[in-house]
Structure formats: C-alpha cells, structure tokens
Amino acid sequence: MNDQKQNKMAVMPMGALVWNMSLPMMISLLVQSLYNIVDSIFVARLSEQALTATALAYPVQMLMIAVGVGTAVGLNAELSRTLGTGNKEEASRVAVTGILLEVISAAVFMILGFFGSNYLAHMFTSNAEIAEQCGSYLFICTVFCLGNFVCMSYQRLMQSSGKAFLSMTILVAGAVTNLILDPILIFGMLGGPALGIRGAAIATVIGQWVSMGTGFLLQKYCNAELHVTLKNYRMQAQRVRAIYKVGIPTIIMQALNSMMVTAFNAILLPFSSTAVAFFGVYYKLQNFLFMPLNGLGQASIPIVGYNFGAKNKERIREALKIIYPAAIVIAVAGTLIFRIFPGQLLGLFSAGDAMRAIGIPALRVISLSFPVAAVTMITGYFLSGLGDGVTNMVGSFLRQFVPLIPLAWLFAKVGQIEIVWYAIWVSELCGAAYAVFRLYIRLRTMYESRSQKK
C-alpha cells in the first residue's frame, strides 16, 4: 500500500496528473512527428517526383509504426495494470517481454525490406524514376528499423512508471538528431555528398537509433521501479497474450491507416500524381496536428490502467471529465489552423499552383471533421486503459476504412475530386457514434458492479 501511495498515479490531483503525464507526451510526439514532416519539406525541394516517392513509401512506414506502437501500447496497458497491483517483479518481467517482442517485430520488417523494397515500390507506381526513389528510401527505412521499434518500448517503460519527462527525452533525442542531419545528408552540406532522398532515409534511421540508445541508458540509470534483465528470465505465453490483448487491436487499428493511405492513393492517382503528393502532405500535417490528441490519449492509458488495477473507479471518472473537454479544445484549434492557414501550410512543402488548387479547399473541408475524430480517438485510448482494445480497433476501422474507402471511390467515379473529401465526414461520424456507445456500455457496467458490491 505504501508503494501505491508514493506513486503519483494514485495520489496526485487528477487535473495535475493528466497534464503532468500528457504535456511531455504531446511535446515528444510533436517532435517525433517532425521525422516525416521535415523529410517531406526538404525532399519537396528536390522535386515533386521525390515528394510523391516519399508519399508512396509512407504506408509501409505506417505499417511498421502500427506494429511497433501497437505492441508498445499493449505493453503500456499491461505494465501500468501490473504496477497498480504493486507487483514490481512481475512488472519487470512484463517489461522484458515487451522489449523482446519489439525486437522480433523489427527482425520481420528487416527481412521483408531487404528482399521486397523494390518490388513494393514498383507495385505502387509505373513511373520508373519515382519507383526507383521510393525503393531506395524504403530499403534504408526497413533494413535498419531496429532502433525505431526498440525505442518505442523504452519510451513506454518510462511512461508506465510515471516518468513522462524521460519518455519525452527518448523521442526528442532522435527527432533533434534527424532535424540536424536531414539538410546535411540530403543536400550535401558541410562538404559531404548530396544523397538526395536516400539522405532523408539515413537521417531518419540514425535518429531512431539515437532514441533507442537514449532509452537504454535512461532505463538502466534512471528507472529503479523496473529492472530490465534477461537473467533468470523466461518468456511466458500469458504475458505475451496480456500484451497483445490490447496490442493486436491497436496494431490492426494503426495498420488500417496504412491500408487507407494506399487505397486513397490509388483513388487519387487517376486524377493526377499531384493529388497523391497533396494527400501525402495532408496526412502528415494532420498527424502532426493530431499529436497533442495522441499524447493526451496515450497518457490516459497508464492513468486509467493504474487506477483500474488499484480498483479506484472514482479517479477513473475524474480522468474522464478532464480528458474529453481537453481533447475537443485541441481538435477545434486544429480545425481553425487548417481553415485559416491552408495556403501557408502547403507552402511549407513548396506547393505549386496545381497542388494549391487541390489542397486549399480540401484542407478546409476535411478539417471540420477533426472534433468528431477526437471523440473516437480519445475513447479508444481511454478504454484501452481498461483492457478493452477492441473499441480502438473497430472505431478506427469505421474512421479509416469502411465506409471511407468505398465512399471515396464512389465519389471519385461520379464527381470531381472536390467531392471525394466529404467521404471523410461520413466515416468520422460513424466512428464517433460507435465509440460513444461502447464507452457508455463499459462505464454503466463498471459502476453498476460497484453499486452491487456496496
């Protein structure tokens, strides 16, 4: 009981706890998302073809992120729950299991990338020059992806232990490295060779390995609550199942993003390659502006998970009352930015007249759906903390795939490109309706069971 009282998840006022946990996560995710934003900004200065190549490669990167983040979210939820019970020895074994699962996941993508990068690139486009650039970019990002996967697990170890600042430090270290190396390697500054799009990929993986190294050192010297060691360790199926109970739905949810972008690219390609380049730019901008939402949602997982494990339902309710209004405010701010400054946002990527003609009205239309999307996202994270990963998965399926892709395809066939964006409105409303229904059912069940016990 003394350990629990000393843990801020149990005793810190909920408003302070939410911001104490989420602000460092928001900052770290914003900085981390600069990996792809900065790559695209610099690559756009090479040519629109190079920008299209990175846009076509992006779904594969998203798939890697899906597996890595999904495993890390499952680790986060199980680790927070175990720490909430006060069993630190078991929590340490869960931590080792999570790291090993990330290493195994990385190995799979390394093999696939080594043998399949060029094949995938030529599947995405018939343009030989774009395919060559896409393939070389993919090869580097996949074959050297170990840092990307393992740094996610170290970051979640810090977060689950309540060390949000150290979690932020892991991601910021890599992102800053990438920011510094991008112009040097792409354009050949400081006397080095100009590597073009390959330089962007090299800068990205170096940054990821710096994050992994930072995570290793911080875990070893700054996180006494968890002892990560392979001594006397045995991987047990029950721990793997517990991690993937939340992790697999999250992986599926994140993988839908990759599938959606690939399908949307195929729908837009008949209009023009500029439309594909714009959608890649839009999706990275949207992800960047959604990072505060993701930070708030991811911070809710250890808060809710810890108090769920400690059977403190009142603090779960307090968290609910703080997190949702904050999410709506963030989403509305994102909507205003997209509607007021669409030209300036596209200008960051050296957008020409053709891209601006497509992109400015599209950003204004799509951004109106952001507050609705926020409800679905936050509900998925909140329920993940309660051990329910299915809502996150199904809600994302409704947001990101069905009815989105069929409607977008239909609108593209019967109208101009301007109509395609309205499919996003319909899909976001479907996802939010489902998520709110699931939240209502789960909370009613939880509080009814409490009343019966009394």
Image (spheres, helix red, strand yellow):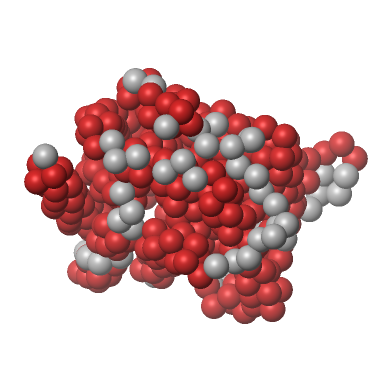
x, y percent for residue 25: 49, 34
Side of 72 where 199 appears, left or right = right
Which quadrant of the structure image shows residue 259? Answer: bottom left
Q: Residue at x 63, y 65 (%)?
A: 234
Side of 9 where 176 appears, left or right = right
Q: Residue at x 18, y 51 (%)?
A: 442
x, y percent for residue 36: 57, 47
For the residue pair 135 and 299, the one nearer the viewer reads as 299
Q: How many marks?
A: 0
Q: Residue at x 64, y 35 (%)?
A: 224
Q: Residue at x 73, y 57 (%)?
A: 231
Locate the C terminus and report the quarter of the image it occupies.
Answer: top left
For the residue pair 308 and 375, the one nearer the viewer reads as 308
x, y percent for residue 444: 12, 47
x, y percent for residue 274: 47, 57
Locate the N terminus and report the quarter of the image it occupies.
Answer: top left
Side of 204 where 20 appears, left or right = left
Q: Is residue 110 visible?
A: yes
Q: Is residue 284 visible?
A: no
For the residue pair 88 and 443, the one nearer the viewer reads as 88
Does residue 387 lie above or below 42 as drawn?
A: below
Side of 320 where 275 appears, left or right = right
